[in-house]
Image (cartoon, coloured by chain):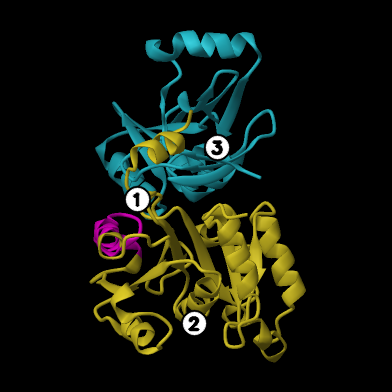
Amino acid sequence: MALRLHGIIGRSDDAAYAGRLHHVEHHGGIELLFVPPADVGRKRFRLTTDRGTDCAVSLDRDEELVDGALLFLAHDRAIIVRFGEQESWRLRPADQAAALKLGWNAGNLHWRVRFDGDCLVVLLDGPLETYRARIKPLLESREVGEVDAVR
Amino acid sequence: MSRIALRSATAEPQIAAARVGIGGPVGSGKTALVERLIPALLTRGIDIAVITNDLVTAEDAERIRRSGLIDPARVSAVEAGACPHTVIREDPTLNIEAADELERRFPGVELILLESGGDNLASTFSRDLTDFWMFVIDVAGGDDIPRKRGPGVIRADLLVINKIDLAPHVGVDLDRMHREALGVRGERPVLLTNCRRGEGIDAIVDLLEREVLFRT
C-alpha cells in the first residue's frame, strides 16, 4: 500500500523544522525520495524512497517541487525530496552567426536549455553522444565549442 | 504530518484532477483510444472529463460529444490554430485554462484526458500541462517507428502500439516491434491495443489507476 502524500509541508532546511528533523534523524527516521531530473516538473508521481516506502505524491498546480522539499513529518519519520543530479552540456558559439545557428538548432530539437552569459547550457535527458550527433557540423567546423559536460 | 492530514482537518477543497495527455501521429487512433477509455474509466467509477485539440475545428470534440459515451458538457475543444505541439508543449495555456474550467464546472472530477491533435514523432507534452502522457503509434505506420527514437516514443510515460490486428496484413512482425519499443524506452511501459475491438484497454486503465490516480 502506497503512502499517499499531497503537497509540500516546507523545506527541510527551514529553521522551523530543524528541531523536529534533528529528533527524527537521531532516531534514524529520515527517508530520502530521489526524483530524477526529467520528473522534477511533475505534479503527480509515484516513487520509492531509499528505504523502500512506496510514495504516491501529488502537488497543487501552483506548487513547485524543490530539492529538500519536506513531504511527510511525524515524530519518528520524515520524507524529504532529493533531486537526482542534472547532467548538462555547456556550449559557446564562436560568434553571433554561430549563436543564431545554435539557437535555431536547439529550438527545433526541443532541447531544454538555460542561458549563462555567452554560453548555452543544455539540460540532458539522454546520452551526450546523441546530442553531439545532432549538431555535429557546428562542432566540427568549430562554430560551436564544448566548454564542458558535467553532472 | 502530511498536507493530506491537514486538509482533512480544515476541509479544504479536494485535490485537483489528474491530467493525462494522449499524443501521436495523425491517424494512429488517439480519438478511438479516448472513445474506449471513457467507458472503461466510467465503469471503474472514475469521474472524468475530456479535452480535444484540433487544428482549426472542433471535429474530435464533436465526435466524442455525439458518441453518447459521456455528458457532452464534459467535453471541451481547443483549436490550436498552428502545429498541435505548440499548445501542449511550448505554450499550453489554452489547454490549462480548458482543464481549469472543467474542474470549476465539475467539482470532483478526478481525471481529465487531453487529446492532442495529430502530430509527428517529436510531439511531447509539457509537465506544466499533464501529470502523465501517452504516445500512440500504430502498426500500419511502420514497424520501424520505435527504432527511429522520436522524442514522443522515447519520453512518453506510456507508449501505446495500436491496430495490432493489422500487423499480419501490413507485413509487421509485432513481437519484434514490441521488443524494439521496450528497448529504446529502457523497459518503460509499452502496451498493445486494438481500439476497434477494445483489446488492451483494461491494461491502460490499470496503469492509470496505479500511477496517476493512486488507487492501487
**Relative image position of residue A61 (x, y in whole percent):** 34, 45
Whether pointer 1 and pointer 3 mark residues with C-beta atoms closer than 8 Å, the reply is: no
Kindly identify the amino acid type of the residue bearing the numbered disc 1: Gly
**Relative image position of residue A110 (x, y in whole percent):** 40, 51
The residue lying at 42 percent from left, 68 percent from top is B48
Q: Quadrant of residue B89?
A: bottom left
Q: Chain of mark 3?
A: A
Shown colour of chain B? yellow
Q: Nearer the viewer, residue A4 or A98?
A: A4
> Which mark's residue is nearer the viewer, 1 or 3?
3
Pointer 3 local density, CA inside 10 Å: few below 14, some 14–19, many at least 20:
some
Q: Secondary structure at mark 3?
A: loop
Kindly identify the amino acid type of the residue bearing the numbered disc 2: Ala
Q: Which residue is mark 3?
A: A36
Which of the marked residues, 1 or 3, is nearer the chain's N terminus? 3
Letter of the chain in cyan: A
Q: Which residue is mark 2?
A: B32
Q: Secondary structure at mark 2?
A: helix
In the drawing, what numbered circle is on residue B179?
A: none
Q: Which residue is mark 1?
A: A107
Kindly identify the amino acid type of the residue bearing the numbered disc 3: Pro
For this view, does B142 lie left or right of residue B127?
Answer: right
